[in-house]
Image: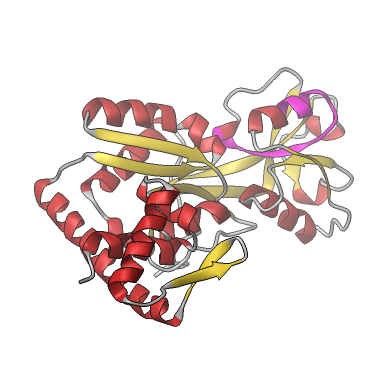
Amino acid sequence: MLTWERLRVFAAVARCGSVQAAAEALHVTGPAVSQHLRRLEREAGCALVERDGRGIRLTHAGRVLAASAQQMDEAAVQAGADLSAISGLVAGTLRVGAIASVLRALLPQVISSLTGRYPRLELTVRDGEAADMLPELQAGRLDAVVMESWTHAPARIPPGVRTHPLVHEPAMLAVHSGHPLAHLPEAPLSSLHDLAWTSCPAGSDAHQALVQMLRQQAVTDVRIRYCVADYSTQLQLVAAGVTAALVPRMAATVTPPGVRLIPCRPTITRTVSVVTAQRTDTPTVRAFVAEMTRAALSTGTTQGPDPLAGSGP
């Protein structure tokens, strides 16, 4: 007879694509997952996985069983969410992924407030880019993702998630105070030729937004010389007089001497949102979204239209 615990582990393996990834999602060891798979195969009477290089892949029987196991797993998750909703309990582990600039600006006060108010809540946080974290959200390895979307590079939101906009803010051109553009009250985008740039790493939303903005201004030689995820470091490079940067207002509250921040015309904006999975709409997740909203409002950054609206179901 097939047991639920082994089916739950098998559903995680099918969803995550490997034993190790499933182990991380379930907070168990890799050998424990492998043991469950071997016992499940004995119970099923057939092979469910086979080696594929250093990883594994599902057999035909494995794919058939995985479909049922994942339906059962989703039903169990929903049942837990329904019970939590009835009791309104904010407890357990909440796994959050967030971009670095929001981690620095908002997450410390949110963590302090939530863990102080809900002592049975264990909140874990990691930084990263939306392109890497959204699949983790879909796979159930994260409960919420704090991400950004820029006017010049709108983020693509996968199906099955919800977006909760926090702030809509302008980005400013950061140049050295001795740069010819530094005396201008506004920086026309058409004047941003012949600049050497620092930006977040390639593949990030901020990097894509800068590249798209420059290309729209017919800049054919986009020179991004310094790829640095941290905006504080980017501003230090600007202060050294070696580069320019495009910095959102949330990340530019403190600037080093020698840096001039100039509004862009037309305005370049980004929206910061919390993204959650529809199937895990629990009191714990809702409490996190509410606290993030309060923290964002306390920064004085205005909310506005959400560029993510309409990109998901």
Is there any visible trace of residue 110 in the rendered image? yes
- Residue 284: give x, y in percent of width and height: 25, 44
Left or right of 252, for residue 275: left
- Residue 291: give x, y in percent of width and height: 31, 37
Q: Which residues are magenta?
A: 235-250
- Residue 312: give x, y in percent of width and height: 43, 67
- Residue 261: give x, y in percent of width and height: 69, 31
Left or right of 102, for residue 259: right
Q: Residue at position x 35%, y 41% from top?
A: 293
Closer to the camera in the image, 260 or 162: 162
Magenta span includes 202? no
Q: In which quarter of the view is residue 225 placed?
A: top right
Q: Residue at position x 34%, y 36% from top?
A: 123
Above or below, comparing residue 253 to residue 54 in the picture: above
Above or below, comparing residue 82 to residue 14 in the picture: above
Q: Residue at position x 32%, y 66% from top?
A: 40
Q: In which quarter of the view is residue 4 placed?
A: bottom left
Above or below, comparing residue 196 to residue 203 in the picture: above
Closer to the camera in the image, 37 or 290: 37
Above or below, comparing residue 48 to residue 155 in the picture: below
Q: Residue furthest left?
A: 87
Q: Residue at position x 20%, y 71% from top?
A: 1
Closer to the camera in the image, 201 or 254: 201
Q: In which quarter of the view is residue 276 placed?
A: bottom left
